[in-house]
Image (cartoon, rainbow, N blue to C red):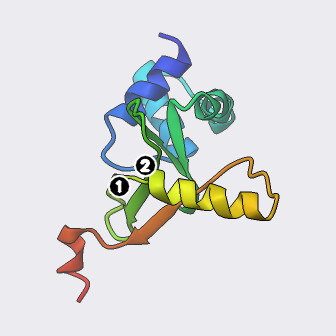
Amino acid sequence: MPLRDVVIRILATSDTPLGAYDIARQVSRMQGRKCHANSIYRVLEPMIRRGEIQSIVTERSYAFIARTPCSLLWCTCRNCKAMQPVEADAIHQYLDKKARAFRFHPAQRYVELVGLCQNCAGHDG
């Protein structure tokens, strides 16, 4: 199985975002031979450009995203690392409008919320 397919399978079955080193460890276990994080990064970069996975900047990790017609932002629990995608078309349109007002041409957008999920909020006070 190509490394790209293995990485997608790992990310698609994970409840939390995974870093390249976490992915490399899982690939190593699945394939029975050492996989280096550099190999994972080489596979991840084109997948991000194609919109197959999302880079979670605040967590230095990656998550599989199902194809969706809307843009998303991610709510990430700082305690358990659970993630919830939220439709964010209006937010992204607002950011684009503001950028155009300054004749700014953004190459990338990262909109992420970090806090506590419903389960962890009760445990953190």
Answer whether labels 1 and 2 touch (C-beta < 8 Å). Answer: yes
Task: Name the image quarter holding the C terminus.
Answer: bottom left
Indicate left or right for 34 with 15 as reference. right
Question: Residue at 43% across / 69% down in the picture?
Answer: 114
Q: Secondary structure at mark 1?
A: strand
Residue at 78% of width from left, 51% of height from top? 105
Number of other residues with Cα within 10 Å of mark 1, as a class: few under 14, some 14 to 19, many 20 or more: some
The one of 46 and 14 positioned closer to us in this rendering: 46
Mark 2 crowd level (few <14, some 14–19, many ≥20, 10 Å Cα): many
Say which residue appears at 45% left-offset and 67% top-offset.
113
Q: CA distance from mark 1 to mark 2?
A: 7 Å
Q: Which residue lies under the disc numbered 1?
A: 83
Up/down of 119 relative to 90, above or below: below
**Residue under label 2:** 17
Quadrant location of residue 110?
Answer: bottom right
Is 67 placed left or right of 49 in the picture? left
Amino acid type indicated by mark 1: Met
Outermost residue on the right side: it is 103
Viewer-proximal residue among 51 and 63: 51
Asked if residue 115 is positioned above or below residue 74 in the image, the reply reads below
